[in-house]
């Protein structure tokens, strides 16, 4: 169940980051509310995941999935650039997270 919590935490993390962009400096109420919910949900589910998973595995995975999600959605929804360096860097994150997972939980 801890991995499910971690997955939910990561989704809330991406929602937080994306909605913060759309909040335009917290001037748009709906996007601001989603940002707050994203922060609370992300940290809340991460806390539940950390009851079982080691912090040295769970926290880096949470931040990595959040980073990858925002890179992908930034490109897909916001038209942000996706350079070769961003792709290589994202691949490095994926391999790093895989290494952490394989190192044991």
Image (cartoon, grey):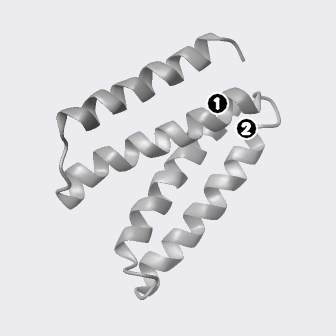
> In the image, what residue occupies the spot 69% across and 45% down?
46
Closest to the observer: 52 or 86?
86
Is 2 above or below relative to 16? above
Q: In which quarter of the image is residue 67?
A: top left
Q: Where's residue 90, x and y in %?
A: 35, 32
Residue 74, position as x, y percentages in the image: 28, 54
Residue position for label 1: 3
Q: Is residue 96 above or below residue 63?
A: above
**Among the two numbered marks 2 and 1 on one chain, the one whose residue lies closer to the N terminus:** 1
Q: Which of 74 and 4 is in front in this view?
A: 74
For image coordinates 54% across by 44% down, the residue present is: 10
47 lies left or right of 86: right
Furthest toward the front, the residue is 85
Please give the name of the residue rendered at 67% of the width and 27% of the height, measured from the top-left corner.
57
Characterize the local packing of mark 2: few (<14), some (14-19) or many (20 or more) Cα atoms within 10 angstroms: many
The residue carrying mark 2 is: 49
Mark 1: few/some/many CA within 10 Å (<14, 14-19, 20+): some
Q: Is mark 2 on a helix, strand or loop?
A: helix
Q: In which quarter of the image is the N terminus?
A: top right
- Disc 2, disc 1: CB below 8 Å? yes
CA–CA distance in space, label 2 to label 1: 7 Å
Could you say whether the residue bearing mark 1 is in a helix, strand or loop?
helix
* Image point (42%, 67%), residue name: 19
Viewport quadrant of the C terminus: top right
Displayed quadrant of residue 48 = top right
Q: Is residue 1 visible?
A: no
Q: In this view, does 87 lie to the left or right of 54?
A: left
Q: Is residue 43 above or below residue 55?
A: below
Image location of residue 22, percent across then percent down:
35, 73
């Amino acid at each position: 169940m801890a991995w499910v919590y971690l997955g939910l935490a990561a989704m809330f993390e991406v929602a937080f980051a994306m909605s913060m962009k759309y909040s335009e400096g917290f001037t748009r109420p709906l996007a601001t509310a989603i940002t707050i919910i994203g922060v609370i949900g992300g940290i809340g589910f991460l806390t539940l995941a950390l009851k079982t998973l080691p912090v040295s595995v769970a926290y880096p995975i949470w931040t990595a999935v959040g980073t990858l999600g925002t890179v992908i959605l930034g490109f897909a929804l916001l038209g942000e650039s996706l350079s070769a360096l961003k792709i290589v860097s994202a691949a490095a994150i994926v391999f790093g997270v895989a290494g952490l997972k394989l190192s044991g939980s």
